[in-house]
Amino acid sequence: MEFVKSRPDGLYLEPGKIGWEIQVSNTEDIKHILLKNELFPKTNFAEGCTETLVSKFIGGPNLIIVAGEEWKSQKKIFNPAFRRSMPVKLFGNITQQLFKRIEGSEKTFDVSDLMMRCTLEAIGKAGFGFDFEAIGKEDSKWTKLYNEVVEGFRDFKYFMFPTLDQELLWLFPKRKVIHQKLNILMDMLDEVVQKKRELLKHGQVKNNDLEENERDLLTLMLESEEKGEGALSDKELKANLCVFFYAGHDTTSASLSFVLYYLAKYPEIQERARKEANLILGDELEDVIPTVDETKQMIYINQIIKETLRLKDPVPRLTPRLVTEDTFLSGTFIPKGSRVTINIYDLHHSEKVWENPAEFDPDRFAQEESNSIWMPFGGGARQCIGMNFSLNEQRVMIAMICKSK
């Protein structure tokens, strides 16, 4: 059976990190896979790459990776936490800090660096009550440490040849130093978890960076344990903090950077966004922080964010899934034991799905059918649990940046 990328059914073969994978890029097969978790469970993320830098940070027993009963148990804990945590005031305060950093300065700023600092500050404070001082301090110790580790993730040769990051690590002294820095970062997270447990034992749940009735995500998770909604080991808790931390900061900062790029490239789209922001927040001179209800009114700004995530999806492919029994996709026989990968990039750039897919057109999301085939956060039962957190952070920041002064 031959798979080629030009097949009309959107199925083709590509080599993966441990063998061939069937890439799936048509809407019907993607929806079928996402809705059939038992037939298409996620493969082991760490398979073939245990003890690599990436695996040590986000390859633990977290919600994104685990399957079956373990996944259901973790989701029972995290769902209430993410539903209850929507710190729009924090997002607004961070945006105000951003304005103070750049106003009056004559230097040129790297937008991607600024967005990284903002989202790192947001996930640190809203996630587990930790201040990275990412915006206020240029040389923040924790920001520098985290950036060096993340830069290590992006070195492609270690992804393609994981043995370089494992048995042969001794040949790369600079890489070994990055592993040591990751260990320091992981120790810091251990301390955060233990300190939070101690605070909760003494009834101290307040997070000074959040509004009075809010809790950070770590507090909400630990409170869920107390309420009998499930319990996590320290290893599971830290594994989830790592993945929430990385996904909640890295993907959101990339999206915000591209939104600002497109607003600069298309002045007419920028003007429409500004008009909407002024209509909702008012056109007074002071910086106004949106409320949760006001973020729901940001129809066009939301369309801009969605179109940006369609064209520049930070996660172009989902974790491969294992086929647990013989099945068919688009009439093609798929044998048990195959690996299938949902290719979000191909779906979002398909001429069969989108009209003029290479064009940046936020108005396409005025149509409800476009929303049903938009999947930057995955879909089905395993859709990214932090989707609303990320989208609200982006709405707040973009609206405040666009608002006229």
Image: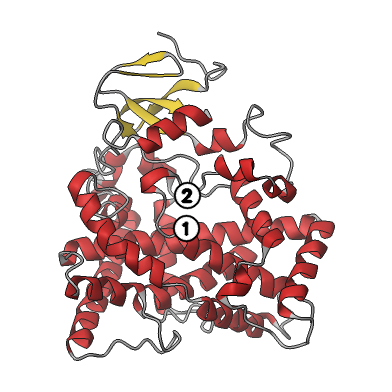
What is the x, y in percent for residue 364? Answer: 71, 45
- How many badges with numbers are in the image? 2
Which of disc 1 and disc 2 is earlier in sequence?
2
> Tag 2: residue type?
Phe
What is the x, y in percent for residue 47? Answer: 24, 39
User: Which corner quadrant holds the C terminus?
Assistant: bottom right
* Corner quadrant of residue 213: bottom left
Q: Determine whether label 2 and label 1 are within 8 Å by CB.
A: yes
Report which residue position mark 1 lands on: 387
What is the x, y in percent for residue 95? Answer: 60, 78
Q: How is the image coloured?
A: secondary structure
Q: Secondary structure at mark 2?
A: loop
In the figure, is residue 285 to the left or right of 93? right
Relative to 342, is 67 above or below?
below
Q: Secondary structure at mark 1?
A: helix
In the figure, is residue 36 to the left or right of 270? left
* Corner quadrant of residue 234: bottom left
Asked if residue 180 can be seen in this view, the reply is: yes
Q: Nearer the viewer, residue 371 or 210?
A: 371
Looking at the rendered structure, which numbered label has been put on residue 377?
A: 2
> Tag 1: residue type?
Met
Q: Residue at x 20, y 61 (%)?
A: 236
Mark-to-mark CA distance, 2 and 1: 6 Å
Q: Nearer the viewer, residue 280 or 187?
A: 280
Which class describes the residues within 10 Å of circle 1: few (<14), some (14-19), or many (20+)? some
Q: Residue at x 52, y 19 (%)?
A: 9
Q: Nearer the viewer, residue 346 or 217?
A: 217
* Corner quadrant of residue 161: top left
Q: Residue at x 54, y 68 (%)?
A: 393
User: Which corner quadrant holds the N terminus?
Assistant: top left
In the figure, is residue 51 to the left or right of 287? left
Relative to 368, is 263 above or below?
below
